[in-house]
Image: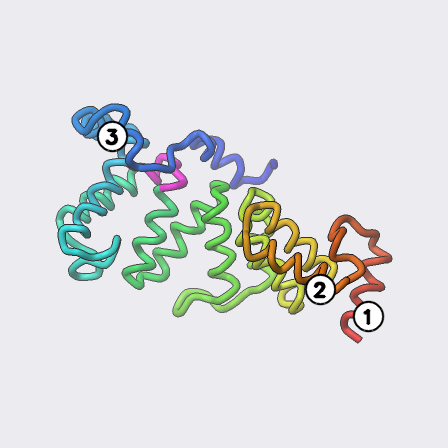
Amino acid sequence: GGGGTDAHANANGDWTTQTEDPHALFEALGTRVVQQLAREGDREAQWSLGFTLMNNADHREGEELGKLGDRGRSPMADQGQALMEAAAGQGHAYAMFALGGVHHAREENAQSVKWITRGAEAGLPMAMHSLGVYYDKGEPGVMAPDHAEAARWYERAANAGSGTAANNLSVLYFSGLGVSRSKRRGLRWVRKAADNGYHRACLSLAQWMYMDQPYAREAGHVSEEEEEEEEASFSA
């Protein structure tokens, strides 16, 4: 694409070249090398070490990530968060997404939305899906529900491989929230969800086929005329 966010993401490096597993670098290089690389500003090392410090801080307290002490704050957790923010500042999309999760666990909603948005704009499918959920449900004190915007992010995430996002988009089409109500398009996204590996969608599609819906087996491309006819009958 030629949009500004795509250009920004490319300038920071394609997220598909980044490491999702924060433990992989430790296994490949060892702790001392990772620590040295993080000090030198390597974003993969900052992400790996930052996540590990936050995780270790929480496990020492027997809590889940982001829930230790005063809204997840401790010297070790703060050091880990600073490293993840440094990695995110260098365009590490997984660090952006993880920071969104940390702030969500602390109920720091505005910060959570900020980091999830940055991850989504960098093209990370799981972040695009999460941003769609934020717009779909709304976030207290930050945003009201915006189903049209939710549909936009769900579609981007679904086309990038998210089965859950495709299934959520089908729900919007079935209900007519933020999009024109259309059973055919809803079924098309159920099939996309199944193709993307969302198992519940496989069951839903089988149920639609069992009910012998005329377009459940195809759920493919249709003309605008067919779409309009189907929507008119659906809303009647």
Measured as percent of width and height from the top left, residue 112 is found at: 36, 56
Q: CA distance from mark 1 to mark 3?
A: 58 Å
- Residue type of the residue flagged with mark 2: Ser
Question: Where does label 2 land, which residue?
Answer: 180
Q: Is residue 46 above or below residue 68?
A: above
Q: Quadrant of the N terminus?
A: top right
Quarter where residue 181 is shown: bottom right
* Label disc, if present, on residue 26 of the rendered structure: 3
- Say whether disc 1 or disc 2 marks the residue closer to the N-terminus: 2
Which disc, if any, is residue 233? 1
Q: For the residue labelled by badge 2, is the local secondary structure a helix, a strand or a loop?
A: loop
User: Which of the two labelled residues, at mark 1 and mark 3, occupies the earlier sequence position?
Assistant: 3
Decide whether the magenta segment is chiefly helix, strand or loop: helix
Left or right: 192 with respect to 41? right
Q: Is residue 189 left or right of residue 80?
A: right
Camera-side residue: 233 or 178? Answer: 233
Write down the region rendered in magenta: 87-94
